[in-house]
């Protein structure tokens, strides 16, 4: 999946908007907040939908986000303008090490291909996808690069 690591870099500097049917939250520097029912999180081009979300904060910063759904879904537009979607029953984003762990019916789709499996670890810093190792197979489809248009009058 070429370009998967190129998530929109400016999204992290945008405000995060969170909506849910219910919340159980503390707005302190070291806290855990649980949101449930039709959870929607947006930040720049990043859009997340899940049944529940648990947001952990340490020293005032978000340190970990756990999304659970049937499935939980993420969409984001990369710096190069390409969309990426991901879905899984559970998505855990650990901000300190920039790793997203997707488990349960994982599907990651980009315009040039997709990746499916039960467990996929995605390192945002390097773009490395580490899948499988859980006794289940992973599958990947890579589409060919579109052919460049032929110049007019080339006599095909």
Image (spheres, helix red, strand yellow):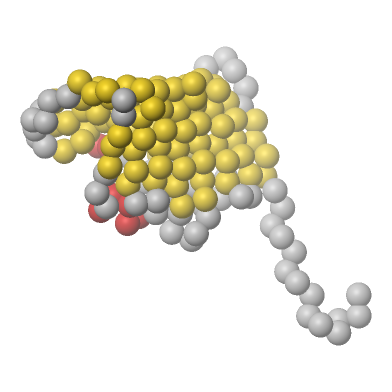
Residue 96, horizontal then vertical, whole percent? 25, 37
Q: Please, which residue is most extreme toward the front here?
A: 21
Q: Which residue is pictured at 16% across the width and 38% down the height?
A: 61
Query: Quadrant of the image for the N terminus?
Result: top right
Q: Position of residue 77 (x, y in %)?
A: 46, 52
Looking at the image, which residue is at 71% across and 60% down?
A: 146
Q: Quadrant of the C terminus?
A: bottom right
Say left or right for 115 vs 86: right
Residue at (53% x, 55% y) in the render: 82
- How far from the left and from the top, in percent, is residue 130? 49, 32
Is 121 displayed left or right of 33 in the figure? right
Relative to 23, does residue 147 appear above or below in the rendering?
Answer: below
How many marks overall?
0
Residue 93, x across and y down, in percent? 34, 32
Report which quarter residue 57 is drawn in: top left
Q: Residue at the far top: name it.
A: 135
Residue at the spot x=44%, y=22% of the render?
A: 69
Residue 103 appears in the figure = no
Name the quadrant containing residue 127: top left
Residue 6 or residue 81, whichever sits in front: 81
Q: Is residue 44 visible to us here?
A: yes
Q: Hey, which quadrant is residue 147 in on the image? A: bottom right
Would residue 71 appear left or right of 57 to someone viewing this image?
right
């Amino acid at each position: 999946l070429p370009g998967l690591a190129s998530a929109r870099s400016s999204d992290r500097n945008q405000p995060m908007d969170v909506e849910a049917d219910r919340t159980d939250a503390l707005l302190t520097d070291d806290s855990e907040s649980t949101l449930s029912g039709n959870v929607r999180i947006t930040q720049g081009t990043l859009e997340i939908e899940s049944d529940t979300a648990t947001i952990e904060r340490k020293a005032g910063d978000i340190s970990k986000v756990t999304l659970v759904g049937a499935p939980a879904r993420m969409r984001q537009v990369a710096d190069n303008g390409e969309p990426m979607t991901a879905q899984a029953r559970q998505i855990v984003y650990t901000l300190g090490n920039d790793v997203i762990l997707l488990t349960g019916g994982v599907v990651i789709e980009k315009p040039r291909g997709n990746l499916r499996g039960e467990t996929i670890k995605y390192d945002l810093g390097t773009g490395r996808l580490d899948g499988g190792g859980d006794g289940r197979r992973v599958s990947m489809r890579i589409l060919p690069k579109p052919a460049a248009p032929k110049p007019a009058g080339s006599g095909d």
